[in-house]
Amino acid sequence: MMRKSLNYFLAGLLFIGISMSSCSDSSKPSKTSTRYIYYTASTGDSASGSDLGFFCFTTHDRQFKQVASTSILNTTGVAKNAIVLFEKEADEPIRLLARCENRHLREVPFPVLPSGGELKYYLPPHVALDYDGHHAAWLMYEEISGGNPANVPYLILYNCNSDDTTIVNILTFINSKDSTISRAEPAGEYVIISNEGSVVWFVLKLYDESGGVKGWRIVKNDAGVMDWASELSGEEITLSGLEFVSDNIIAKKGDAIYSVSSTGSFDPTYLKPGNMSNPYQFARTRKELAVWTDDGIAIHKYGEGDVFNKIVDFVEIGNIYNNYVAAPTEKLAISPDGEVIVFGLKRTDSGKFDLVMANRDGNGLTLIKEDFYFGMAVVSKEMEVE
């Protein structure tokens, strides 16, 4: 659940990648192919000193590069042009920067309300980046002293091509739909965005006029038009991810995982709540996702019933790597093309983690880095090194 405390905060939300349409391009001959593996390390992950930051590992030469050297809280998935967003923790206001292949940086203006009011980030702030790498979305709020409600939520939409930011007052939308709702706040951590960036989903926890919880609803912003994407639920709803082929939302309601269609119907799935930890378990170009099972990691294919194709199991991992806990972690992601997974294994000796990569067929089990603290890792599709 999101927190509204600002005891610590983010100084930068850096928008980093190898190319953007608004940045000057430098053409170089193709040499070989690689995958970019990004991972975060923050004080909240128990990292410290030189281990803090945002790091990039390239698979073709097995080289690490420290992109940022301060505490990094979260990262988005990797767009098809290797652009990725990450959130930098410090004592300054958040900045959104674009880093191009030629290493030029471009700052995105901090969202400013027409009234001059100050926008703040919900904590932890999770920013969604579309697969095309041209649109981002996140949630903020305006704190109104003595106001009712005290916090007004906003949806922030950023167009990377035109460098435009759109600020949508969520409370205005709610008041136009249901006058009995007195206030609303985001439920769960994640905003979900479609591949091309035109549709954004999030969940609101709604309160009635007496201040009691009215229920939870999914909201969809489709090309600038906001509407409910589900009926009111008395059970808490949180978003887990998106079937990027069908644009069905994967959400937890109560103690079960559902596929939510465009009509708002909740259809049961074979997924267990413990399988779901973040949206980056979903492939961006295939109707499948990587999940933890009771004995390892598998790929679940939608539309094929209770079919889980095992990638690796704990026994197999144990034959290669020692001193690890044979249990799921929140550190699991699949590449956009569905060909590679990266995951964290907790060590029994130090309590730190190993970062491991494997192909979808279970081959190529590779130790990326061992015995260190990190938060989240994501991996790109296969790309040419220019």
Image (cartoon, helix red, strand yellow):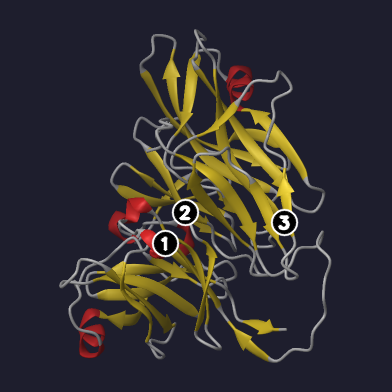
Looking at the picture, tell me which residue is in the foreground, 104 or 87: 104
For the point 24% across and 85% down, the residue is 321
If you read the primary sequence from the N terminus, does the residue marked by circle 3 or circle 1 appear first? 3
Image vertical order of residue 206 relative to residue 199, above or below: above
Residue denoted by label 2: 74
Q: Which residue is mark 3?
A: 134
What residue is shown at x 19% (from left), y 69% (from top)?
350
**Image quarter (top left, top right, bottom left or bottom right) of the N terminus:** top left
Horizontal side of 108 relative to 358 (left or right) equals right
Callout 1: helix, strand or loop? loop
- For the residue pair 208 and 23, the one nearer the viewer reads as 23
In the image, taking residue 83 as reference, residue 192 lies left or right, namely left
Q: Position of residue 161 (x, y in %)?
A: 80, 53
Tag 2, which secondary structure? Answer: strand
Q: Residues within 10 Å of mark 1 (few under 14, many from 20)?
A: many
* Residue 232 position in % (x across, y down): 45, 30
Q: Residues within 10 Å of mark 2 (few under 14, many from 20)?
A: many
Is 51 placed above or below 136 here? below
Q: Is residue 288 above or below residue 92?
A: below
Q: Residue at x 42, y 87 (%)?
A: 361
Of the residues under marks 1 and 2, which one precedes in the sequence?
2
Q: Are marks 1 and 2 in contact (CB under 8 Å)?
A: yes
Q: Along the line of sight, which residue is nearer the eye, 234 or 130?
A: 130
Q: Is residue 307 visible?
A: no
User: Residue 39: x percent and y percent?
Assistant: 46, 66
Quarter of the figure with the C terminus = bottom right
Look at label 1 and name its amino acid: Met
What is the total number of numbered labels drawn onto the structure image?
3
Mark 3 residue element: loop
